[in-house]
Image (spheres, helix red, strand yellow):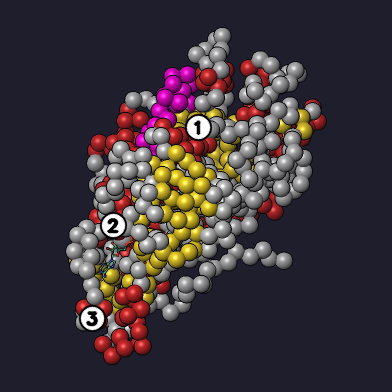
Amino acid sequence: MINPRFGILMESVRVGPKTARNRFFQTPHSSGTGFWMPHIRAGLREVRAEGGWAVVNTGYCSIHPSCDDHPLDYPRLWDDEDIKTHELMVDAVHRHGALAGVELFHGASNVSNGFTRLPKISPSGADRYAPAHAWMQPGQSRPMDREDIRNLHAWHKAAVERAVKAGFDLIYVYGGMDYLPYQFLSPKLNRRSDEYGGSIENRLRLTRELIEITREASKGTVAVAFRFSVDELMNVPSDHAPSEAHEVVQIMGDDPDLWDIKLSDWPQETMTARFSDEGSHEELYAWVKQVTDKPVVSMGRFTSPDKMVGQIKKGLLDFIGAARPSIADPFIPRKIEEGREDEIRECIGCNICVATYSQGVNVRCTQNPTFGEEWRRGWHPERSRPKKSDQRVAIIGGGPAGLECALVLGRRGYNVALCDAASTFGGRASREAKLPGLSTFQRVVDYRLGRLQTMPNVELYPGSPMTASEILDLGIENLIFATGAKWKRVLVGRDMTETDPLDHPNVYTPDDIMSGAVLPDGPVVIFDFDDFYLGGALAEFLALNGGKVSLVTPASAVSTWTQLTNDHHLIKRRLESLDVAIRTGAFVVGFDGQSVELGFDVPSNLEAESLVIVGRRQQNNNLFHEVRADGGFREKGISSVGSIGDCRAPGIIAHAIYSGREYAERFEEPDAEEFNIKQERILI
Ligand code: ADP
Ligand code: SF4
């Protein structure tokens, strides 16, 4: 039963001609699953409808070949053939009583057109310089003339008609993120002198025309949403309102049936939990409801029902919008409705989803390994197939992989014993969660442990370091090793292969630091060729503890992979503010306890009494091999021995969780193979 405190979240809301059953709104977000993956797309949207979201939207959906964002994957409505790909999603969403929305999009100059090779168009050819976007194509856009604007009207109308045919309930005009209507709105990008440029009324003209066309072409049968990036225009002064952003809402007021408020600065909007808290965009949308009577939705990585209720009660929002929280837990609304809010699998704000979108691959999630696997692997975030037998399972190692595997096997009904050498479960997630800014990593552990503790068929044995003979004598038929990996003391050569381990007592690894090793007082060098978050997080930790820290990396930027998680610039700034000296494009080749030797292109020395190497890891799989050796385990009545997570292949936490899930899903399933992934095919 729902906690009455949260009842307000379940109130229905009228949006134009449609009614949303509650206040949970999955805002449009990309899923890295383009027009050629309609089943995968439908699967990952359907599960949100099943989980209770009242509105489920597509990601940005291109209306015309002059807007193509390859190699990033996007759905499209370019011609009637594309309608079918959306019907799959619409039907799936409707099956669960939710409204289906489509975010129609033309990206103007903020797309690649790498696939169609058509020139990009924009209001006046004043493109934003985007140096970090490796997928952007060289070249500038073509200013739109009157014919282009007439064409745009026609393309938008055709896309609306197709969206209506596909059955969508809600259609977006997308005036955000430097996409076309936004470029017209922006005084920096719109330098036109005709009736589409100059005054704010003129810059708004195109947006209002598109809204009008949407209404006419849909014959009033759908709700029309306007997605509006406010951050930049909130800093543009206006003679008639606190800012031009306010003036836009003032002028348009009731034009759309729904206001969806977002930022134009994507890294700012999708900040990791390391640099932003839940609800951190409040000031950007807090004023909108004072200017319009239409419902307003916005986001803030909301996972706490109390915070959500606060947003509604304070009159800031009508809908709780979510992208990442709805990926991490598609069942947030149902869990709240059923009084199970303690079961919410909270987004950890790690941005693996963001990174994989930016890589042009299917979006994945650290917390929810089933995301994107609903159709192709048949996985579900809350359910798994029932067990096949009464066989028991022992899992050795309770880090992310072991915890996820135990959770799924336990849910399937198997008797599971999960043990860990450490006094608490969590493995690397718990260790890393103690580093500055990474506390949300503990949610990976808390969610799983919380569920496991309620399962009568799962036994938990913390503080249990196991040997091979002890494991063989457990009398449990199935053994799964989730014993993780250890950071190595090796360096990396000019050819990027690893060297022999460095043998010096003052050489440390992340494992040493996270287990509380006390470093000598003198300067520390971190040599980071892992290049994700950990090197930077350790530098921050050591600097905050008073160390004089330098970070050396062969990469061209500190924590370089975090350019994909959208927090690279913040990490760099944070380290600089702590006086961490950053040396890029450099290799540590030696260390004598007084200094590190930097080699190859620019040989030099850096003063250092200790060296921390964040580079490669070694599977902690000796036990696994010992137990499996010669197949002798069979004589002990053991039917299977497997390995998962970092013990199988060192990777990020998302990999470990996926690996634990994958093993548990196919355990005793003869038809399920590790490599048997259902394929989407283009039929000829
Ligand atoms: P993953 O990311 O693959 O889950 P982790 O390194 O996070 O890997 O977790 C591995 C866990 O395995 C650690 O918590 C560690 O304490 C545990 N472990 C390693 N060796 C043993 C052992 N011999 N007996 C019990 N637990 C072990
Ligand atoms: Fe949240 Fe990380 Fe999952 Fe993205 S990948 S939804 S940030 S937990």
Amino acid carrying label 1: it is Lys
Q: Is residue 98 in the magenta section?
A: no
* Image quarter in which the C terminus is found: bottom right
| Residue 623 vertical position relative to residue 548 in the rendered view, above or below | below
Q: Position of residue 349 (x, y in %)?
A: 40, 44
Q: CA distance from mark 1 to mark 2?
A: 35 Å
| Residue at the (43%, 50%) spot, across then down | 596
Q: Is mark 3 within 8 Å of ligand 1?
A: no
Q: Position of residue 643 (x, y in %)?
A: 37, 72
Q: Position of residue 83 (x, y in %)?
A: 65, 51
Work out whether residue 421 or residue 588 is closer to the camera in this orientation and state it. 588
Work out whether residue 43 or residue 605 is closer to the camera in this orientation and state it. 605
Q: CA distance from mark 2 to mark 3?
A: 24 Å
SS at mark 2 in the image: loop
Q: Which residues are magenta?
A: 273-294
Q: Earlier in the sequence, mark 3 or mark 1?
A: 1
Write down the residue under mark 1.
262
SS at mark 1 in the image: strand
